[in-house]
């Protein structure tokens, strides 16, 4: 029996555009999706980039006019990987046209904008997705499943950090990432840490923030320019569950390329994770026999769905682009009514709200409810 | 300008069939290949499997008759993921039909068969590829490049091991892997270790083998059956360069899922690697300042081609299936005259010859030249 | 030439009493001290314990009357390992008697008491020592030396944590550690993290605290008793240097036995350390060649004084009790005028002040200068 | 009640002399020994070194005449840390004088000499000890205990390596370690690996050796001198238990300072260990629940005797010199009739025999029974 078809329109052909294209190509080959996917059209402001992407990624058409693509009734899904500042306009247009929308993170520079987007999508009853792909890792799924099953006992606390060093060098020039709309380290990558914190421990209720700018100005074509955003954004956290914790987003953490690490502990066990070895989850159980206890290194394998769809043997490891394929699969299946949206606009809004609450808390030097 | 097309025919739809299909889908999206790839036909002895694979992986046609597919003049490349015992017949048929052939490892149960295959391919002037995909890892490429550039000084030695535990349980039933044609642990996975050893240190000249069967019989439908192959195959090695070393293939190494590890050392430095963290290469340099020396953990990034084609930022990590895409890309480009075959039948034969030499050495209890 | 003699009087024969005794025995054998040490008298409230300790540790005399020992003119140094609540009275008595005093941490439950002790010692011009022995680790010395030499460039930030799990079980009974004088996790072990933070990055100027009690009551002989102290104490930090950071003390961190970890980063490099492997310092340098950068694992060796006095070869490793010997050596030499006191009462007071500032900040929910 | 006294005479004041002195000082303070120890006399050929050692380590007397010391009826135990070539003469003299003898490894350059020493000691009914202190590590004790208790099931195999790099540099001059009596890498440090192999897996029955000299000559005052010993000594092993394995001793393994590593696996579990983190034993159990299996990192603690005598809390870690104290304690208690000698001359002879068998096997290129 033939599956229904989803025609895909992709906006943007950079790093994330390529990641989406790879995800759309891999997902139906790895997963048994509710739909067949057709790579219909790719849009880029540069004709050459659009053409090259269409040829390379297998899109049937290309265009420089994303509005036309969004309006095309043949297209079912719009994938947005354009600069952050355009996410809102593009999403609203796609939603208005009745498309399902897959938008890269952050959903929008301001929570107010993200709210508008989420409300519009819900009113239009389209499916949405925000690209928090680290959550698609089978080992994060395992972590959540273990917590929900009570394997850690009662949750006590969590520490999450997302640290990289791509803004470490003060000579790195001023870019869109350094103005308010760019958001700063907390918004750019700390948002991943916040997503992980709530993914594992449930709703955060209060935050106490500390956002600091360590590189006050950066070179620009017109001379040194003042940086408006944080290089490090930290917060203490309270969860509805009673657990407490801390979070940090940091883009000047020298030497760190992808330190998305957490440690979560409860009365009966603990889990430690490092994105630098993201096919491993480390687990301590107080139920192990005395003298034999220790953090154990669980390697991803077929016991940890959906790993087995990628590879039948443990230890072979998924890569970053595989997480994107899992994300696409979840989104497509949600469109097909098989399971919930993995991380929809409402959830993207939630992260944006947490980021802003931490920023406000930092300015006000006070705890803030969220 | 349109690229020429390669029509692909795939035999087999199991784990490796899927891996090949994913590789063919990803390679042209990640790399700028010499050809466009068309997934033409997939063959499986089971009609249903063939049909399902065609639909899932995007092949235009499917068949239960691999011979017909191999004879189809429309097809340019035959990809073989059928059981080992069929590799020879299928490869020779494909070569005879003038196809380029991509065959999973081991090339054939016997070096004599592999030789016949390599000779046929060379005579027919088709391109060939054997699936030693661990060598496609950018960090192995980096290791070889560092060695060739003299960063380790004069090579002294290497230790390589490939250990897993999928045959650890004596209750695991007898299968084709346990008879002579299956080859045993040394042939099945020790072959990877041998490939790595020569990839890094150049030609092995002599071996002293030690192959042991630790589980002498395994259950079969007709009662306990004697295992004819090794569970552990080890050898001491001599290299043309003057270096010496050791190798081990082991499929009863309890707890190990993918321990393809090496340590190679020279007069000026050393490299250590573990497939369990295959996006990392660990490097010690005697040239670092006194008191500041240590093994350093180099994380894969855009400095280590072709990583950057998958992801623009370091630390995001490739997965097992990405290695398959790199392998496919190398093979396709070799067909297009851009670069050498990454690992052709002659090289596959070489590995088979090393395996047999070690087995013979073990039986004879004597050093053997290779 | 004979060295002058220091007669040692030790109060307390528990874990820390034994550690001090081992330190006094080892220090003169490992180091060339300014004095010879004589183990003169050991005091314990229990006659049997005092006698056994004298015999086991080699003290010439024993007593149940610490006041008499402190008053004994033959004794030069008083070592205090009695319960925290007695530190002040004992120290002041020893200082009044003109003894040099080596007191276990925390110096006193309240900063006000610690101040009194520090002032008294300075007035009496005796040498003092507080047992912050993790700072005596050669690898921490290396870290500070690298920072001072500018090897990390301009300091940007630090994260320090000291986490253990000895209070993880809610069934662990109420003890002196759970009342105000005990101090809680921040005072008990977070104090180590604070000491490390200032040891590496210089003076802290402001703190924003978050102290939480996760186990609100614990069993006691008279029924459940309310815990008055924090199980987790965290703070954000500002340093005089301009760096910022965070600190955490946590005694319910399931699975952690001795996680005294830090990561400190500057414009040119970073250092990461874990007490679980305390003979290793991990170092990242942005000055390493492109494509060869990574955190390098420096193993303690003779290049990292005073390691070489314990062992002439790298990699053999020091243990916890060796750090105590280093601490003793520094103290004795300070008495002999060779070098400063490693960590005197004034410094102990400083830590106590930081702990209280964080506790106050947590209650007031406001940044506090220190 | 007073304990009987053992008067100690120490020969040699270098690295190992100091280690013995520290061990004799620490052992009675950490352990409840059968005897009190008196540091009676230290001997060194250099008067100044002997005097300095006596003063530093607390020996009552010093001498340049080891023969006189050995003959002194006041002395009960002779500790030998002189050059290897003197071990035999000194040991035999001490045994003849009825002393208990603690001799550093290797017992003697030749197994024939070691045999003479072992036989003499047994005839004289004195207690003996050879300094294989890595075996005194509580985590090795735990490993053996787990194996004996069947926690790994039926033993299948072991890999042991002892690699360092102190002979890596070809410019390192010729020394006594490079002539036959020095023994080479296998004798010098591979002996530790052999000791560990039999400690864990029981008697080795057959070996197949491969000893190679990678630095054929080294500078000497009289010009380049030919090296007579191996830089790398490897062997395949057969055990009486049916297990098989491999061993390597290597002193040119660039970057390695103390890689005494093993992995031992059985039908139900595996243990991995690295001396670089010698307070940790890593354990995999096939009995852990599916999806939760992994190598777990057991940190040394009071559950692993005699760790708790050094420190009451897990994770604090023992150091190299603590292993020496454990070794001394075992020896003294054996003299006192409390427990067996930890590693006596007969066992030292056994290791020497294994080393020679491997060397012979390498020369003969044949398996040899041992």
Image: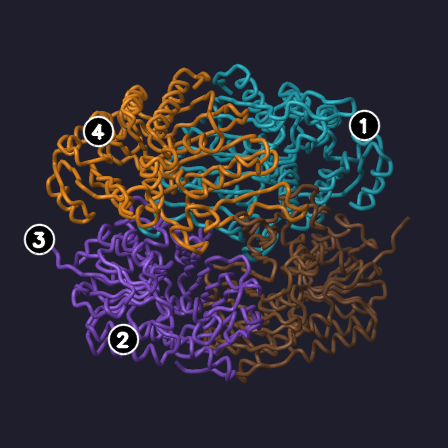
Chain colours: A purple, B orange, C brown, D cyan
Residue ID for mark 1 = D67
Q: Residues within 10 Å of mark 1 (few under 14, many from 20)?
A: some
Residue at (61, 51) in percent of width and height: C279
The subunit letter for the residue under badge 3 reads A
Q: Which element carries disc 2, helix, strand or loop?
A: helix
Residue ID for mark 3 = A1
The answer for how far apart the CA atoms under marks 1 and 2 are is 96 Å
- Disc 2 with disc 4 on a shared chain: no
In the rendered view, does B78 fall on the left or right side of B260? left
The answer for how far apart the CA atoms under marks 1 and 4 are is 83 Å
Q: Residues within 10 Å of mark 2 (few under 14, many from 20)?
A: some
Evaluate whether residue A238 shows in this view: yes
Most distant residue in the left direction: A1
In this picture, is A56 found above or below C130? above
The residue lying toward the viewer, choosing from D263 and D268, is D263
In this picture, is A234 found above or below B97? below
Front position among marks 3 and 1 = 3
Residue ID for mark 2 = A92
Residue ID for mark 4 = B94
The answer for how far apart the CA atoms under marks 2 and 4 are is 53 Å
């Amino acid at each position: 029996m033939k599956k229904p078809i989803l025609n895909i329109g992709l906006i943007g052909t950079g790093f994330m555009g390529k990641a989406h294209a790879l995800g759309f190509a891999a997902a139906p080959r790895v997963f048994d999706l509710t739909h067949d996917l057709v790579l219909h059209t790719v849009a880029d402001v540069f004709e050459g980039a659009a053409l090259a992407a269409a040829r390379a990624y297998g899109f049937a058409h290309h265009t420089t006019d994303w509005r036309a693509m969004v309006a095309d009734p043949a297209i079912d899904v719009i994938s947005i990987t354009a600069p952050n500042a355009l996410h809102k306009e593009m999403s609203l247009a796609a939603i208005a046209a009745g498309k399902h929308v897959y938008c890269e993170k952050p959903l929008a520079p301001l929570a107010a904008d993200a709210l508008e987007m989420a409300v519009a999508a819900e009113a239009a009853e389209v499916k949405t997705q925000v690209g928090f792909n680290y959550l698609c890792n089978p080992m994060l799924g395992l972590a959540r499943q273990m917590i929900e099953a009570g394997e850690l006992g009662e949750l006590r606390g969590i520490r999450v950090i997302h640290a990289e060093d791509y803004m470490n060098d003060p000579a790195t020039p001023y870019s869109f990432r350094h103005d308010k709309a760019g958001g700063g380290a907390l918004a750019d990558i700390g948002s991943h840490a916040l997503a992980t914190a709530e993914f594992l421990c449930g709703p955060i209720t209060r935050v106490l923030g500390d956002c600091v700018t360590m590189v006050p100005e950066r070179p620009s074509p017109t001379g040194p320019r003042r940086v408006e955003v944080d290089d490090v954004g930290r917060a203490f956290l309270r969860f509805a569950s009673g657990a407490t914790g801390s979070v940090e987003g940091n883009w000047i953490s020298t030497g760190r390329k992808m330190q998305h690490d957490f440690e979560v502990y409860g009365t009966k066990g603990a889990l430690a994770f490092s994105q630098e070895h993201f096919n491993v989850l480390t687990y301590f159980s107080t139920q192990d026999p005395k003298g034999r206890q220790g953090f154990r290194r669980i390697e991803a394998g077929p016991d940890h769905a959906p790993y087995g769809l990628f590879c039948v043997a443990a230890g072979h490891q998924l890569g970053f682009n595989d997480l994107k394929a899992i994300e696409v699969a979840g989104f497509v299946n949600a469109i097909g009514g098989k399971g919930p949206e993995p991380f929809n606009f409402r959830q993207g809004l939630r992260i944006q709200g947490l980021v802003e609450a931490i920023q406000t808390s930092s300015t006000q030097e006070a705890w803030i409810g969220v």
